[in-house]
Each structure stands twice: as structure tokens, then as C-alpha cells.
């Protein structure tokens, strides 16, 4: 039995459907129960609660962004700083680096999801309810779409982002996948298409009713692909 599900049933007895509140945190994809801005994680017979509390100081708009960045990088470490064994829950997966073209199944036997490399961390889009990985030490910034068909734009770069460009772009698009993009891979509900040209590598992905467009220079092909394959619904 899943101890986190048992905790949910006992602590939040007025709520139903545990799967609706299930969430994953950090590069190790730790299972958590998400209630509002509070995350509950089961670990070695204890339940840890990580919560965002609104500050009375409204002059600090970065607080929520910092909190989300903390969640994206959160992991359990022992005193010596080495990764601990994450086997307390049968559904908790240990992150292992993937060789090219490798896949791993999640708790749904009929689904296959990509696993980000150890040098990736996650950001979460609250408006569009998805998360995606990007390289550790890099930066990202989101903005409303400024051109036709783009609903929201995320710029990703290895340097602080002062404009909307960045090196790699992740867009939520409203026009769907173009006919020139060819089927590439499927990971459970994530359907990926590839389209290349004009010195760029370009992927489209469909998930949860949204279409994502991830693209960048050819020399960043592996990173662009990893970002695309890491897209996960947080609903």
C-alpha cells in the first residue's frame, strides 16, 4: 500500500480521489500530496510539509518564484551529502541517467515517461499546469505570447535573461502541431513531433489539451529534446 495515500485518506478525509492531488517534486520526482500551496511528502515513517506562506511585505513579488525554484530542486540528502535510497514508497523512483534512446516506465504499466538527467532541474507553470526540465545553473523567464499563435513564451538560457529570446524557447501555442512536423515519440499521454530547418531543431508536443513548441540551435539538440521529453502535466 502507498503510505502517502493512506496519509491522505486519514488527514484529508473530506477530499476524494487521491490521484487529483498527487504531485512530483524535484529532480528525484518525489511523490507528494499538493493541497493549495502546501506539499506533503512521506519519508521513512515521517510526513514532511513544505508550504508557501504569503508575506505581509507586498514589496517582494519574487517570493513565489523562489519557492517554486526551491521545490524544483528539492531532494533528500543524508549528512554526508550523497544521495540516499529512495525506496520508502513503492511508487517513488530513483533518478538514473539515461543513455540515448532509453526509456523507463512509471507506475502506470501502459505508460512510458522520460527521466531527466541528473544535471536537470524543473520549473512549473501554474497557469498552464505543467512542469518541464532545464539544465542546472541555467535561467528561465516566462512572458505572455507576443506574436500570433503563441499563448505563453518561456526563454531558457545559460546566462541571465534580460529579454524574451534566450537560447532555447518553450512556447504554448494555440494553433496545434503544423503539418510539416513528423511523429517522433510517444510517452504515455505525451505525443512528440519533430521539425527541423533553417539551422534550428524544433519539437512539438501535445499533452493535456495543450500544444508545446520547443526549439533552439542545432548545437543544443540534445538539450532541446530533453526539455521536450520532460514536459509533464501537474493537474
Image: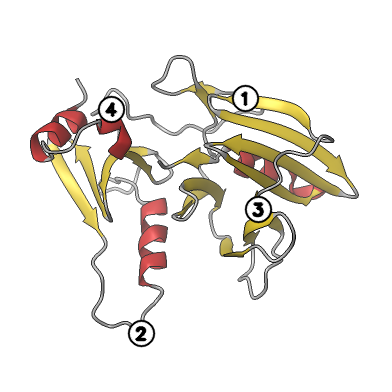
Secondary structure found at label 1: strand
For label 3, the residue is 171
Residue found at x 33% / y 30%? 92
Give the spatial CA distance, label 4 vs label 3: 36 Å
Say which quadrant the N terminus sits in: top left
For label 1, the residue is 186
Secondary structure found at label 3: strand
Give the spatial CA distance, label 1 vs label 2: 44 Å
Secondary structure found at label 2: loop
- Cβ atoms at labels 3 and 1 below 8 Å apart: no
- Cβ atoms at labels 3 and 2 below 8 Å apart: no
Residue 152, quarter of picture: bottom right
Residue found at x 84% / y 35%? 180
From the viewer's perspective, tell me whether residue 61 is left or right of residue 158.
Answer: left
- Cβ atoms at labels 4 and 1 below 8 Å apart: no
> Alpha-carbon neighbours of circle 2 within 10 Å: few (<14), some, or many (≥20)?
few
- Seen in the picture, residue 63 relative to 134 is either above or below; the reply is below
For marks 4 and 1 on the same chain, the one whose residue lies earlier in the sequence: 4
Single out the mark in the foreground, 4 or 1: 1
The image position of residue 33, as x and y in percent, is: 26, 41
Give the spatial CA distance, label 3 vs label 1: 19 Å
- Seen in the picture, residue 83 relative to 70 is either above or below; the reply is above
Say which quadrant the C terminus sits in: top left
Residue found at x 72% / y 33%? 193
For label 2, the residue is 59
Q: Is residue 233 among what the camera can see? A: yes
Single out the mark in the foreground, 2 or 4: 2
For marks 4 and 3 on the same chain, the one whose residue lies earlier in the sequence: 4
Q: Is residue 83 among what the camera can see? A: no
The image position of residue 5, as x and y in percent, is: 20, 30
- Cβ atoms at labels 4 and 3 below 8 Å apart: no
> Alpha-carbon neighbours of circle 4 within 10 Å: few (<14), some, or many (≥20)?
few
Amino acid at each position: 500500500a502507498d503510505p502517502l495515500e493512506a496519509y491522505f485518506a486519514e488527514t484529508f478525509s473530506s477530499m476524494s480521489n487521491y490521484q487529483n492531488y498527487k504531485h512530483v517534486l524535484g529532480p528525484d520526482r518525489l511523490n507528494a500530496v499538493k493541497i493549495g500551496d502546501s506539499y506533503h511528502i512521506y519519508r521513512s515513517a515521517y510526513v514532511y510539509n513544505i508550504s508557501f506562506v504569503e508575506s505581509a511585505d507586498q514589496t517582494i513579488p519574487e517570493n513565489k518564484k523562489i519557492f517554486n525554484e526551491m521545490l524544483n530542486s528539492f531532494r533528500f540528502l543524508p549528512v554526508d551529502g550523497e544521495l540516499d535510497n529512495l525506496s520508502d514508497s513503492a511508487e517513488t523512483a530513483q533518478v538514473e541517467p539515461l543513455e540515448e534512446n532509453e526509456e523507463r516506465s512509471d507506475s502506470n504499466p501502459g505508460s512510458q515517461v522520460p527521466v531527466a538527467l541528473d544535471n536537470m532541474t524543473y520549473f512549473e507553470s501554474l497557469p498552464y499546469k505543467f512542469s518541464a526540465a532545464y539544465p542546472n545553473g541555467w535561467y528561465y523567464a516566462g512572458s505572455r505570447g507576443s506574436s500570433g499563435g503563441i499563448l505563453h513564451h518561456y526563454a531558457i538560457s545559460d546566462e541571465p535573461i534580460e529579454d524574451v529570446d534566450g537560447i532555447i524557447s518553450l512556447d504554448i501555442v494555440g494553433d496545434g502541431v503544423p503539418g510539416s512536423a513528423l511523429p517522433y515519440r510517444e510517452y504515455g499521454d505525451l505525443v512528440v513531433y519533430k521539425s527541423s530547418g533553417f539551422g534550428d531543431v524544433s519539437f512539438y508536443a501535445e499533452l493535456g489539451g495543450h500544444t508545446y513548441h520547443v526549439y533552439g540551435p542545432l548545437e543544443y539538440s540534445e538539450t532541446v529534446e530533453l526539455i521536450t521529453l520532460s514536459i509533464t502535466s501537474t493537474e
